[in-house]
Amino acid sequence: MPQVLARKVGLDYDARMTRPRAGMRTVKGVSMARRKKIYEGKAKILYEGPEPGTLVQYFKDDATAFNAEKKAVIEGKGVLNNRLSEFFMTGLSQIGVPTHFIKRLNMREQLVRQVEIVPLEVIVRNFAAGSMAKRLGLEEGTALPRPIVEFSYKDDALGDPLVPEEYIVAFGWASQQDLDDIISLALRVNDWMSGVMFGVGIKLIDFKIEIGRVWDNEFPRLLLADEISPDSCRLWDIETGQKLDKDVFRRDLGNLTDAYTEVAKRLGVMPSNVTHRPKPTLIN
Ligand code: AIR
Ligand code: ASP
């Protein structure tokens, strides 16, 4: 579709990238997304998908930190996270980790399975950093004796408090069996992610994942959901220790898009038209 026409009818850049598909109607040859917003979070929006049981996950450029006390719009972040999350989810599903990811639709959107989100942030740590370093008075970067999995209760009003497993089971957020499955899934994600990042000279310090539940008939299954991106990981360059993740924004360490671009380039998934650079280097 010509860009001028797209602008005239008030479609944004991303809508123009979407080819007409089920659930869209065409006005004067222009595809119009007429879809219902299901949920808007801090960095993403979920829309009703084309088929029952599917959603469209839209990656915004918004960055927040410290429970949204600090906010900014970082141009290009959503495009990079869409690609990076696609890369991680696809790779993980290839080693047999079940995920919600179906396919990437365009620069900012991916088709995912609709899941019931387990109200937990599942955090895996290989090296002390962030809240753990603070809580235990450890120097950031201290190697942990083994990967540690911890859980926060997903509640913005409470600031996502760290919770013991006993709370999770007692309050019915997940069963003990779910927790055992979630821990082994999280450790598989950690092993794969650590290896992939190590291969491109990056140390996986820690990360956060979210888990979704789907029902096949009456049988529940757990899937990796949400996203995996530098918004949800700590990534340090192995040689220099340079931070290539959201801490760059949280701690005002420089340009966040540059950091995410570096990760995307090293992994060979740099999108061809992220706007902040006049001529991005094409890796593939
Ligand atoms: N995380 C936790 N809540 C939201 C996010 N993104 C991620 C952080 C970090 C890990 O979980 O990005 O990779 C641990 O965070 P913290 O603050 O508990 O040290
Ligand atoms: N995204 C969360 C927030 O807005 C936590 C973080 O990543 O710092 O507070």
Image: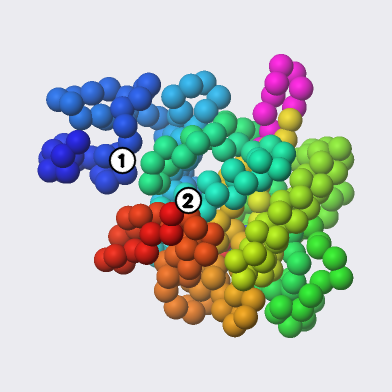
Q: Position of residue 183 (x, y in %)?
A: 81, 49
Q: Is residue 6 left or right of residue 284?
A: left
Indicate the quadrant of ligand 2 in the picture: bottom right
Say which amino acid is labelled 2.
Arg
The quarter of the picture where residue 170 lies is top right
Q: Nearest the camera: 156 or 26?
A: 26
The dominant secondary structure in magenta is: strand
Mark 1 vs 2, N-terminal side: 1
- Whether residue 200 appears in magenta in the rendering, the answer is no
Going 45% across and 29% down the picture, which residue do you hit?
48
Q: Which residue is mark 1?
A: 17
- Whether residue 219 appears in magenta in the rendering, the answer is yes
Q: Position of residue 70 (x, y in %)?
A: 47, 68
The quadrant the C terminus occupies is bottom left
Say which amino acid is labelled 1.
Met
The mark tally for this picture is 2
Q: Nearest the camera: 195 or 7?
A: 195
Picture disc at residue 184: none
Q: Nearest the camera: 281 or 274?
A: 281
Q: Is residue 206 left or right of residue 170?
A: left
Q: Residues within 10 Å of mark 1 (few under 14, many from 20)?
A: some
Q: Which residue is mark 2?
A: 83
Going 47% across and 63% down the picture, which residue do you hit?
265
Residue 76 in view here? no
Q: Residues within 10 Å of mark 2 (few under 14, many from 20)?
A: many
Marks 1/2: CA–CA distance: 15 Å
Look at the image and give the residue range highlighted in magenta: 211-220
The quarter of the picture where residue 238 lies is bottom right
Q: Nearest the camera: 170 or 273?
A: 273
The quarter of the picture where residue 102 lies is top right
